[in-house]
Amino acid sequence: MKLWITRPMPPAVADRARAEFGAEIRDSTAPLDPDELLFALRAFDVVIPTLGDLFSHGVFAQVPQPRCRLLANFGVGFNHIDVAAARAAGVRVTNTPGAVTDATADIAMTLLLATARRAGEGERLVRSGAWQGWHPTQMLGHHVTGKRVGIVGMGRIGQAIARRCHFGFGMQVAYHSRSPKALDFPADHVSDLAGLASGVDYLVIAVPGGVETFHLIDGAVLAAMRPSAILINIARGEVVDEAALIHALQARQIAGAGLDVYEFEPAVPQALRDMENVTLLPHLGTATEEVRTDMGHMALDNVAAFAAGRPLPNPV
């Protein structure tokens, strides 16, 4: 069985992949280009792709009878893979749920706190050498403890964020999802997204990417938010209409934003980079050694099950 891993992996994962499967590991950290996508389907039995490796309907159309029989995605999000087209071509798809939950929730709180308390702006001020010392009205930000947070999406990650907000900061939690959830903390289910946006101090996006959530946060939702409210996105960039967000920030419809993902990633609009009230991170949601290693082992567990003819642990 030939296994190809499309990006460099943490050492423990790379060692296991080579020892157990004789894996070939691509050196580049960039997404697969169009020729490499075709090569992946034609030359390997199993591929471990990740975010940015766009296995679209068009790619499968060019390789109607692929050698590849499993895309063991490295990551919980798989909107870069057309799952229906993969299935039609006889290619199964798995992902790595669970491993990413806590790390992604931690990044949501990092962005919420950093944006509310103007941490990025403050650090830039200190580094510039222009800080003139403490005074009573220096860089006044937004309080977090006891405020109301709205979470869009109450899956594993949404619930982990909500627990941190409620138990850690005494925040009042409201959320929007298709149906109410049975939760182990108090939270108000709000069926109308704009209604949720209008009633919270912080709006945190925690839904999967894909067609159903594309531009879910649009101009109307942003216009419903309070002028003092802050938007946090740790989901997928395309969930937020980036042009509408820029307009809302420039028009001061909202107070700020904390972003770990971007609509046309890795491109980040200059308008966002120029704003002091926006915290920008380079997609760090799962970026810890432990989590990325766990994700890699989970992907390899799916490969091992496939190779042994066992049920796949994490099919999508």
Image: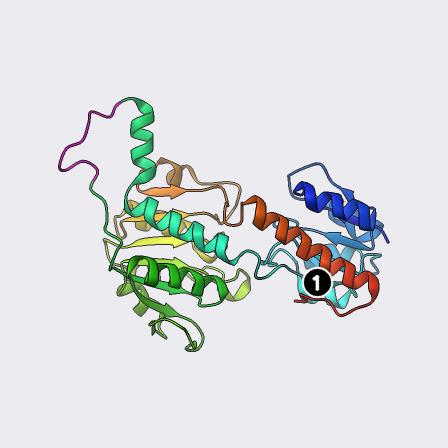
Across and down, in percent, residue 290 comes to 58, 48
Q: Main secondary structure of the magenta part?
A: loop
Q: Is residue 160 left or right of residue 82?
A: left
Depth order, front residue of 311/150 = 311
> Which residues make up the magenta segment?
130-139
Q: Is residue 183 left or right of residue 83?
A: left
Across and down, in percent, residue 27 comes to 71, 36
User: In terms of image quadrants, where is residue 179?
Assistant: bottom left
Q: How many marks?
A: 1
Across and down, in percent, residue 239 comes to 47, 58
Residue positioned 54% across, 64% down in the render:
211
Q: Which residue is label 1 attached to?
A: 93
**Residue 85 to residue 258: above or below:** below
**Residue 181 to residue 149: above or below:** below
User: In terms of image quadrants, where is residue 189?
Assistant: bottom left
* Magenta highlight on residue 12: no
Residue positioned 40% across, 73% down in the render:
184
Q: Is residue 51 left or right of residue 70?
A: left
The quarter of the rendered structure image containing the C terminus is bottom right
Q: Amino acid at mark 1?
A: Val
Residue furthest out toward the top? 129
Can residue 23 be seen in the rendering of this structure?
Answer: no
Depth order, front residue of 17/175 = 17
Can residue 124 be seen in the rendering of this structure?
Answer: yes
Question: For mark 1, does the 10 Å Cα neighbourhood hold few (<14), some (14 to 19), or many (20 or more) residues?
Answer: many
